[in-house]
Amino acid sequence: MKENEKPDKGNQIIEEAAQAEYKYGFVTDIETEVIPKGLDEDVVRRISALKGEPEWLLDFRLKAYRHWLTLKAPTWGHVHVPEIDYQDISYYAAPRHNKQGEAKEIDPELKKTFDKLGIPLEEQMRLSGMAVDAVMDSVSVKTTYRERLAELGVIFCSISEAVKDYPDLVRKYLGKVVPYTDNFYAALNSAVFSDGSFVYIPKGVRCPMELSTYFRINAAQTGQFERTLIVADDDAYVSYLEGCTAPMRDENQLHAAIVEIIVEDRAEVKYSTVQNWYPGDKDGKGGIYNLVTKRGLCRGDHSKLSWTQVETGSAITWKYPSCVLKGDNSVGEFYSVALTNNWQEADTGTKMIHLGKNSTSTIVSKGISAGHSQNSYRGMVKIAPKATGCRNFTQCDSLLLSDTSGAHTFPVIEVGNDTSVVEHEATTSKINEDQIFYCNQRGISTEDAVGLIVNGYAKEVMAKLPMEFAVEAQKLLSVSLEGSVG
Amino acid sequence: MNALQQYIDLFDQSQEVFEQQSPELLNRLRKVAREHLQDARLPRKGSEDYEATDLEAVFAHDYGVNVNRLPFEADPGETFHCDVPNLSTCLYYSSNDAFHSSPTAERNIGQVVVEPFSMAAVDYPELMEAHYGRLARMSDPTVALNSLLVQDGLFIYVPDGVVAERPIQLVNIFNAALDMMVQRRLLIVVGNNASLKLLACDHTQSPDYRYLNNQVVEIVAMPGSTVDYYDMEESTPLTRRVSSIYVDQREGSNVLIDGITLTNGFTRNNYHVEVNGEHAETQLLGMTIASGEQHVDSHTFISHNTPRCHSNEMFKYVLNDNAVGAFAGKILVKPDCPRVEAYQGNRNLCGSATAKMYTKPQLEIYTDDVMCSHGSAVGQLDEDALFYMRTRGIGIDEARRLLMQAFVADVINGVRLDALKDRLHYLVEKRFAGTLSNCAGCLASCRKN
């Protein structure tokens, strides 16, 4: 009898764990200014007016909007994006500010929200030593440490402020890496983008602290369309972190962001993401559609761009952080862990476009699929005929934790000359039963064992994350896996 | 522009002639094909799975089609020999798309059936009915075009329990003195626990004309059967080839397909394998040696539809001059198919600054308890190995040749006929040395240039 009971009990624990709620699923009760749903030229003009933008930016938005009208949503991804009604989304939502205290004080409710998320908004929390730009819905709420960074000439502010304060810089770089003609979602973002971060590291400056942006979708029935622009001038260095969460809601919400990075001679940019948007519940209801265009241009010789991402959230992820390696001897890196559970779908990977001589790139992608989820790696390595002496190494491994999940790899390799070497390796397999058995023997429950094994499997990527994020990401991996064993 | 239109128009004008000369079965499928072609377009370069290959351009040329099946006078058996030394085979010829048997074919009587569709439709109507056109996908316009225009084909049947003693050798020759397109079609049924070894080789007699071979091969491997299919191409720079091989594998069957391209103009090889039985084993091998303006594109798809089956793929390309190589392979493991082992490899050598390689290895896995991997690499010869050989007094050219031969050796070693293996080593050696000329004793001038 007892023997019969055992699996039942095990199942019960698993079921309880499966129902473990998304930790960041709360909603902040805060007065929000939302413009009515719908999208037309007037909405684009209104967003621009609300933000007090100059003429050229409005022009840019309108051009993008008109181009977007001619496009169709891409269908090639291994994800099932349902027909999105773009007229049923509100394109701008801002926590209402107390006009007088706008610059100095932030709403206590808001502060509480970011405290709950563990984001050190207050500058007295100096111990954490991280400059943060917090973006709630469509606007940047507060950027910390600005003054200290300004002493070094580092600009770190919201993109709306940058448009006002540094219009020439923004104009010079905006849309240069991801033009509005790039793809459907990029065009949409270019038309209606609301806020995001702007970073400029001047020549020869090594940014003394990690810069971080925290994105939060709060208001219902809105989409978030943020835009991040990072410029590292000659010999500069910056490490940038991005985190995201959203409340639990039954309807799906859209997140279509653009990240553009420009890396000049000998500069280095490290971009890390821990993506934890609400993934929907265990039946696949709700969740964020994360349809993002991220691209960096290594324009200078000896420049380096490194993407590290830990993807655990979103109902649908469609994201390919890419490097255009234009400078000679430039370096592109992509390290990714994508974990999908329940009914999540992720189609993620990278593009490495080698245009400069002797440029090198490394891709390490680890996919983990559990529940009924589908996890795909889609990548492209292209070596232009004139880019001689290039080197690429790609490794993408998939781990399957359930017999109902799927893992797929779709890499494309194009080599145009005879002095470049490209390697690609991929494996797909189940979690090793011997390892689980070994852990069980040592008194570690199956669930913890899976957490351990998965963390070990993803370690290569985790090691690339800045310390603060690595700890969070590690916890996140274990939490996201809860309920997936059985 | 739609390159298919000229052939559709030709068919519409001479439908009666096509139908008079073919068995009823072919005519039935012809109607289906015509419907599929109504709005079909050939894929252009850059479309999904055709990253480097423009089929529209390949079919756009105005090729002649032998609608009236006028016989070509020359007996290919007299002018053409493609012997594999030390290998006794039953030889068959297809001259353009008409089949001839040779005296050696007699030796398999009572065992293996090799006959044209026109005879097979009378002798084995059930088998033809059951399998003809069952595997080939009409959604592929080239397959639909083949089904539309094909007038005859070759039916190979190995009855249950029969082990074909001698390999069947099928020599395909183009010998028309005009630009010509042919629709070759093969239906191979290997019965329960039966075994077949088939060598097919493509040759061209005249280098001055443009030929297009649009072929479809359907292979049914019944439970416990073994099928070896060696498909070698040695043609001329003006020859175009689009080949689609479809395989249906049943329980415990073992299928080996080896596609070898030594010389050609443009080649697109599609391999589509459906593994429908447990413990089935699939080996898909490919080797390409390309130089000049050669273009070789291989596309593989292995669908594992049952648990506990095993597949292994290895494609190797050696590209020189302006050659273009492309490989796209997909392994699919369907839901509820545990214990599948599937491996895929694609290794490529780019030997010149203008050679181009496109590769797209893909895995699509819907079951967790599987072992699947793919690997792909594009690179050059090992500098250290070259240096080592040069220190031992081997010239740079010779050293390069030796290393290239070693590179493709494991594909050749997958061949399960020793005599053929030796022959291939020899041919590859000559190919790399640039001295691949007429096969000994052959009067055909396929290697004139």
Image (cartoon, grey):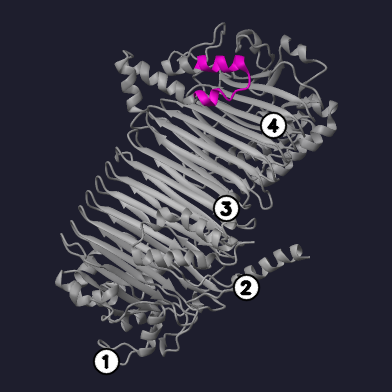
Measured in 3D between alpha carbons, the distance from the residue under mark 1 to the one under mark 3, in whole angstroms, is 59 Å
The image position of residue A105, as x and y in percent, is 28, 89
Element at label 1: loop
> Is A438 on the left-hand or right-hand side of A107?
right
Q: Earlier in the sequence, mark 2 or mark 1?
A: 2
Disc ID at residue B254: 4
Placement of A162 over or under B152, stated as above or below? below
Is the stretch drawn in magenta largely helix, strand or loop? helix
Number of numbered discs overlaid on the protein picture: 4
Q: Specify the subunit that label 4 lies on.
A: B
Circle 1/circle 4 CB separation < 8 Å? no
Compared to A417, does B179 lie above or below?
A: above
Instruction: For marks 2 and 1, give the CA distance.
Output: 46 Å
Magenta stretch encompasses residue B419: yes
Q: Nearer the viewer, mark 3 or mark 2?
A: 3
Q: Amino acid at mark 3?
A: Tyr
On the image, the x and y values in percent for residue B304 come to 66, 44
